[in-house]
Amino acid sequence: MKSNNFLRNLGPGIIVAALVFGPSKITITSKLGAGYGFDLLWIIIIAVFFMAVFTAMAARIGLSINKSLLSTISEKWGRTISIIVGVGIFLVCTSFQAGNSVGAGIALGELTRTNKEIWIILINLIGVALLFFKSFYKVLERLMIFLISLMLFAFLITIIMIKPYLSGVIGGFIPSVPNGSTGLIIAFIASCFSIVGAFYTTYLVQERKRISKFPHEYKDNSLTGILLLGILSAIVMIVAGSVLFPQGIKLTTATDMSMALKPAFGNYAAVLFLIGLFAASFSSIVGNASIGGTLFGDALGAGSDFSSPKTRLFISIVMITGAAIAILFGHLPLELIVLAQSITIFIVPIIGIAMYLIANDKKLMGNNRNNMFFRISGFLGLIVVIGLAVINFKNLFLN
């Protein structure tokens, strides 16, 4: 019975892990391993720690309040703030949806030697079709578990085959900053420590409670997914550090990254890597669109029920817009990257601060209010988020 309950409650964390571990995460993590071996494994612990702290806070918020998080923000600080957050997240998700569509299109296009535009259209049509299943959340949950398992399998088999140098792996968890690695370190922490992903956890937990046949037995297992995110990141970095780093291979294409799997899969390495890239891209297409559409609809007063036609319409808009951008431009336009990063600079700190204050609110949270550990670690997490925002602001507008 306990095992069944665990599996039943595991969904929210798996979904967040799947949408965070997208094509950009695979690329960044592979570059870290290929460029610096095992030296930067320690940053995974830092990024996953803060992601776990804010995900746990978000999950407890979802368990404690009956209204959505944006509705709670509206009541505490005014509807303008909740609209700014909702619209900002919608624009960010729509902007980066194109990159996810391109990643999935390239993976299947190279795999079948066909035009990637055809796959971009088909993949997004499948994504939209998923919205019309009777229970969208359950379909989303099972899909994410399958895709995460697919990625984990390919890299896990490789790491068993190559038998990495254990003392080198252990040494990688001792903090050091190799020359020229600062940019990739910042990029990894920013992508892994996803405040928006943590924010969305409240909605996933509330939806899981709503559809559960045993709501009185619900327990928060969302951290399992975040730990899985850390394990996946570590495996990819160790594989790249073991295979690509000794050869001095600089990653520029998907084919370059697939060479990390060659010791285990030989000539099939490219095929398996492209399948993994598709899994990461498609999981991000569905998850990213769900975030943008759900929160945009909630900010506009349409609610956040996953089964609501209005919510599904907003999610569809994110998917269709991202696919259209991908087909028209063939890649994610630089202007949209700048727009998304600019919005993120101002939105993410607001989201983090709002979550932190609500999680500390005794009236709203009751016994689930932050204890001293979460107050201190959450505050440190906010410093990291604000620091990343300052760095991004300087890079975008001052350099």
Image: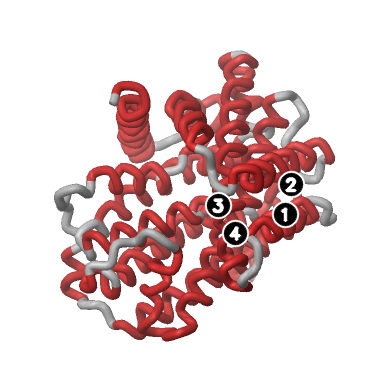
Q: Is residue 283 visible?
A: yes
| Quadrant of the snapshot with the C terminus | top left
Q: Determine which residue is flagged by label 3.
A: 19
Q: Residue at x 48, y 36 (%)?
A: 334
Which mark, residue 104? 4
Question: Gap in Å between the C-alphas at discs 3 and 1?
Answer: 20 Å
Q: Do the residues labelled 1 and 4 touch (CB within 8 Å)?
A: no
- The answer to whether 320 appears left or right of 61 in the picture is right
Q: Is residue 234 above or below residue 336?
A: below
- The answer to whether 159 appears left or right of 81 in the picture is left
- Tell which circle, 3 or 2, labels the residue nearer the N-terminal end: 3
Count of numbered circles in the view? 4
Q: In this view, does 72 lie above or below 193?
A: above
- Tell which circle, 3 or 4, labels the residue nearer the N-terminal end: 3
Question: Gap in Å between the C-alphas at discs 1 and 4?
Answer: 10 Å
- Tell which circle, 3 or 1, labels the residue nearer the N-terminal end: 3
User: Percent from the top left, x then y, of residue 70?
Assistant: 62, 28
